[in-house]
Image: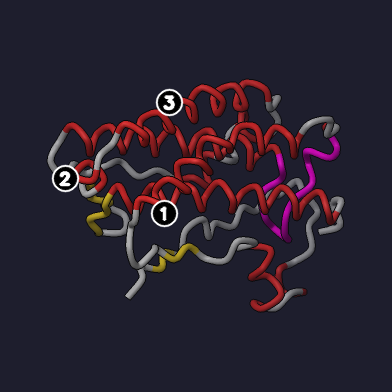
Amino acid sequence: MPIVLNYCTYVVKKTDNKQPSTKRMNKEQLEPLRFPEGRFIAPESYTQEVLSEATETIANFPSNIRALVKGLSNQELAWIYRPEGWNIRQVVHHCADSHMNAFIRFKLALTETNPTIKSYEQGLWAELGESDDFPLEPSLQIIDGLHARFAALLKSMDGSDYKKTFHHPERDKTLSLEMNACLYAWHCKHHLGHIKNAIENKGSF
C-alpha cells in the first residue's frame, strides 16, 4: 500500500488580517486550495525514473518559484492562497525554511545510522517577523543555492544511499530518503500551487 502523509496541513490565523472564516467553505471546497497537487502519496516503487524525476523537480524549483513571484507588488505578496492560509510572502520564506531542514536531514541520514531529526513548528516560524513582512530576495537566494546543492547531492546518491533512513519524532516513523526525495519534490509543486492560487484569486479570500 502507498504511504499517504498529511503534510503541510497548518492553519495560520493572523489577528490583524480581516479574513473570512473557513466556515464559508466546506471541506470539499477547501481541499483543492489546501492541496492543489493533491495530498502526498508515496510511490509504490522507487525506480530510477521516479527518483530522477524528483531530482529534476527539486533542481528546477528555484527558477519556477522566481517566475511566479517576479514583479509582484507588496500588496500582491500579501494575498493569501485560501481563507486563513499563508500569504505569498510567507509561502516563499517557508520554502527556504523547510528545504533547509530537508537538506540537513538528508545529510544526517547519509552520515549516521537512522538519526532522530529535529522537528519544528512551521506554522509559528511563518509568523515570525522576518517571515511575515521581510523581502523575498534573501529567501530566493537561499533557495537558489540550497537547491543547487540538494540536486547535486541527490544525483550523487546510489541505491543504497536512498534506502537510508531517519526517525521523525513528531510522526514517530522511520522514513527513507527515497520517500523523502519524492516528498520534497511534491512539496515544491504543492507550494507553487499555493502561490498560483493566491495570484489567480487576487486577494479575494
Q: What residue lies at 47% left-to-right and 48% top-to-bottom?
A: 53
Measured in 3D between alpha carbons, the distance from the residue under mark 2 to the one under mark 3, in whole angstroms, is 22 Å
**Image coords of residue 9 (percent x, y):** 53, 60
**Image coords of residue 127 (percent x, y):** 60, 40
The answer to whether marks 2 and 3 mark residues whose Cβ atoms lie closer than 8 Å is no
Amino acid at pointer 3:
Arg
Q: Secondary structure at mark 3?
A: helix
Image quadrant where residue 119 sits: top left
Q: Residues within 10 Å of mark 2 (few under 14, many from 20)?
A: some
Q: Nearer the viewer, residue 7 or 192?
A: 192
Amino acid at pointer 1:
Val
Q: How many marks?
A: 3
Q: Secondary structure at mark 2?
A: loop
Disc 1 designates what residue? Answer: 50
Q: Mark 1 or 2, which is nearer the eye?
A: 1
N-terminal-most mark, 2 or 3:
2
Is residue 78 magenta-colored? yes
Amino acid at pointer 2:
Asn
Q: Nearer the viewer, residue 41 or 202?
A: 41
N-terminal-most mark, 1 or 2:
1
Q: What label sits on residue 114 in the rendered view? A: 2
Magenta stretch bounds: 75-88
Q: Nearer the viewer, residue 53 or 141?
A: 53
Q: What residue lies at 65% left-to-right and 47% top-to-bottom?
A: 192
Image quadrant where residue 10 sits: bottom right
Q: Residues within 10 Å of mark 3 (few under 14, many from 20)?
A: some
Disc 3 designates what residue? Answer: 149
Q: What residue lies at 69% left-to-right and 57% top-to-bottom?
A: 84
Q: Relative to 78, does residue 156 appear above or below in the rendering?
A: above
Is residue 87 magenta-colored? yes
Q: In the displayed structure, does residue 163 sit left or right of residue 139?
A: left
